[in-house]
Amino acid sequence: MGSRNRSNEAALHAFIGKKAEIDAMLERLKALSADHFETHPDEINWGDVGTLEHYARLLRRITDSAFREGEHAD
């Protein structure tokens, strides 16, 4: 097996590991969202809105990069 093949195989294993890491984070976020980010409707305040706005802003950076949108558009 050549050096290039070993390098590609190592890259594939690293890629699969990072994908699994991302998938686990997404599952945790989905579960947290399904639980309304551990809030109760009667207790929601503007601080909670600000927290979700912050999360959305961070996720938007990721989705813009992944889908080449926003500042990452061609």
Image (cartoon, grey):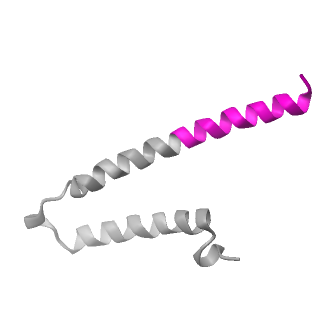
Residue extending farthest to the top is: 1
Quadrant where the N terminus lies? top right
- In the figure, is residue 16 to the left or right of 43? right
Quadrant where the C terminus lies? bottom right
- In the figure, is residue 27 to the left or right of 73? left
Number of callouts: 0
| On screen, residue 24 above or below 34 | above
On the image, which quarter does residue 51 sit in? bottom left
Name the residue located 17 percent from the left edge and 71 percent from the top edge. Answer: 45
| On screen, residue 8 above or below 65 | above
Q: Nearer the viewer, residue 1 or 48?
A: 1
Q: Is residue 3 magenta?
A: yes
Name the residue located 43 percent from the left edge and 49 percent from the top edge. Answer: 26
Residue extending farthest to the left is: 42
Q: Nearer the viewer, residue 52 or 6?
A: 6
In terms of secondary structure, what is the magenta stretch mainly?
A: helix
Q: Is residue 32 magenta?
A: no
- In the figure, is residue 41 to the left or right of 1? left
On the image, which quarter does residue 28 sit in? top left
- In the figure, is residue 57 to the left or right of 49? right
Q: Position of residue 73 (x, y in %)?
A: 65, 76
Q: Position of residue 46 (x, y in %)?
A: 22, 74
Range of magenta residues: 1-20
Name the residue located 56 percent from the left edge and 69 percent from the top edge. Answer: 64
Name the residue located 25 percent from the left edge and 56 percent from the top edge. Answer: 37
